[in-house]
Amino acid sequence: VYQVFESVAKKYDIMNDSMTLGIHRVWKDILMHKMNPSPGTLLLDVAGGTGDIAFRFINYVRSIRERQLQQKLRHHQNLSWQEISESYQEDKLNSLGDSQVVVCDINKEMLKVGKQKAQHLGYSQGLSWVLGNAEELPFDDDKFDVYTIAFGIRNVTRIDLALEEAYRVLKPGGRFLCLEFSHVSNPLLSRLYDLYSFQVIPVLGEVIAGDWKSYQYLVESIRRFPPQEELKAMIEDAGFFKVDYQNLNMGIVAIHSGFKL
Amino acid sequence: VRCQLPPPQRALQTSAVLRRVSDEQKEPFASSSQQRFDSHPTSHQPGQEPQGPHPSYTGQGGQESEDYESEEQLQHRILTAALEFVPEHGWTAEAIAEGAKTLGLSVAAAGMFHSDGSELILHFVSQCNVKLSELLEEEQKLVQLGEAEKKPTDQFLRDAVEARLRMLIPYIEKWPQALSILLLPRNIPSSLNLLTSMIDEIWHYAGDQSTDFNWYTRRAVLTGIYNTTELVMMQDSSPDFEDTWRFLENRVADAMNMRDTANQVQSTGEAVLQGLMGAAVTVSS
């Protein structure tokens, strides 16, 4: 798995866009909407290499925070100039409202690409990059509010271990969210999807990234991955409650959610 | 394979948050949450087990262990805790998140609920209805024990509606927002259900023996009175809402008059009919 992603890291984002025709952005946005994080949330994004989820999280929290501050100002109509200037200062320093995201990935190259992207796009506050293995996270118990793993869990050898680790590092009441390719039950769509996956994607891999094998591996790993209900059962086994899933694009992708209660 | 897991096994997994039910006994609220969003209006069953065939989507086959509270009970606890934050944050996921925080849970727990705060509002309405029922039950007991006079119907209705509406006062600034959310198509079945069962409760305790109002008319009339009074209350700025209570008094009086008028119309109608019959008989013979 490590070597696959080493070669894939640099072209990861471009490949994502071309393979999914850009829809992966929508999927990730939907994930963020579902999470609906409030300012002050501590997020752990596992296998989050190039930072897509992390950046979206920061944007989301920032805009919620802005709205909160605007509402607060509206209620305090009788502030003196001194107080107003102080509150603007506070805004600048605290635009994220103490929210933080830790991006954890097993692969150094992916993290490197992520850090470069962050610098390039101007994300500096509230971001940490940690090298780590999903099956054995380098974090203490009960630390995070939300744990996400977007398109990463199918690359984990022991999914049950990763789920147990997720349970361990989440605070009580914390949420587990998993965005992953899943099973299409509609037979017609399934045929088209298979066709696209096996014929088009490796070709794109060769053309854009110069790597047929990795993308063949990708497509095969998607097929091997447990379908929605099975993954839901595995999540419940790890101890999560209120486990549920939402199919996107008729099952091509699914978001699984569970709570540590 | 999952469903064959015996219930005790699930209990042995130390749940991080779900408390043992024995702890629950100290909390009076948990056992009195009788009004379910989609249950039929029934009479009280104090101490009813809140765990029921809840449409749980966790696929555990309803095999929650009897020793631990169910997720639903935990959700109720969170929503109750969230109510105190409503005046500040409105009926939103933020209020729910704050409520979860006070229980020692992560703010992410608010993700269990819909982001528009529907469940919070429905929970509140349900709680108010329960409180109203308890109030009316108390009053009835006093009357039965002879310690209080039985009120005339119009007085009873006025007091019941006023008592129920007064429960909105701490949240009145954000209540219009709540009303609009209750009207969303998704919420209408539940909110309508809660409304009608509350109205039925009031009539049940009013103990109106008169049979001239048929059941649907009574329901409709009181629902109309309640809804219009609620709307008036939203934009009432008089001290202690006296304008609202006066409005209420007038509406109830109207309803009583309508009943008398209806009687009059009915008897007049009968008289007219008899007259016509008589005339017909006279003419034919």
Image (cartoon, coloured by chain):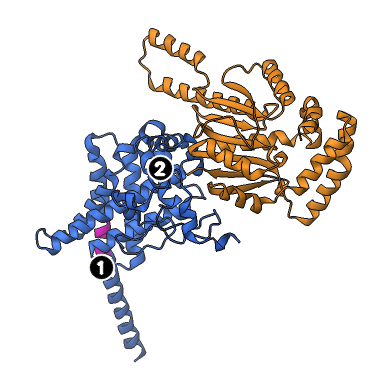
Chain colours: A orange, B blue
Q: In this view, does B269 lie above or below A18?
A: below
Q: Residues within 10 Å of mark 2 (few under 14, many from 20)?
A: many
Task: Answer yes or no: is residue B114 visible.
Answer: no
Residue A86's mark? none
Residue A123 located within the stretch drawn in magenta: no
Q: In this view, does A209 lie to the left or right of A168?
A: right
Q: Residue at x 72, y 50 (%)?
A: A183
* Picture quadrant of residue B262: bottom left
Q: Residue at x 31, y 72 (%)?
A: B269
Q: What residue is shown with label 2?
A: B78
Residue B259 located within the stretch drawn in magenta: yes
Earlier sequence position, callout 2 versus callout 1: 2
Q: In this view, does B222 lie above or below A245?
A: below
Q: Could you give the CA–CA distance between mark 2 and mark 1, rounded to whole angstroms?
A: 53 Å
Amino acid on which disc 1 is placed: Gln
Q: What residue is shown with label 1?
A: B264
Task: Check the residue under mark 2 and report the chain it is in.
Answer: B
Q: Is residue B285 left or right of residue A33?
A: left
Task: Answer yes or no: is residue B263 visible.
Answer: yes
* Picture quadrant of residue A214: top right
Percent coordinates x, y for residue B199 in the rendering: 33, 57
* Picture quadrant of residue A27: top right
Q: How crowded is mark 1: few (under 14 residues within 10 Å), some or many (20 or more)?
A: few
Q: Are marks 2 and 1 on the same chain?
A: yes
Image quadrant containing the C terminus of chain B:
bottom left
Percent coordinates x, y for residue A201 in the rendering: 85, 39
Q: Is the magenta stretch mostly helix, strand or loop?
A: helix
Image quadrant containing the N terminus of chain B:
bottom right
Using the image as rendered, state which of residue B169 and residue B79 is in the foreground: B79
Task: Check the residue under mark 1 and report the chain it is in.
Answer: B
Amino acid on which disc 2 is placed: Ile
Question: What span is in magenta?
Answer: B255-261
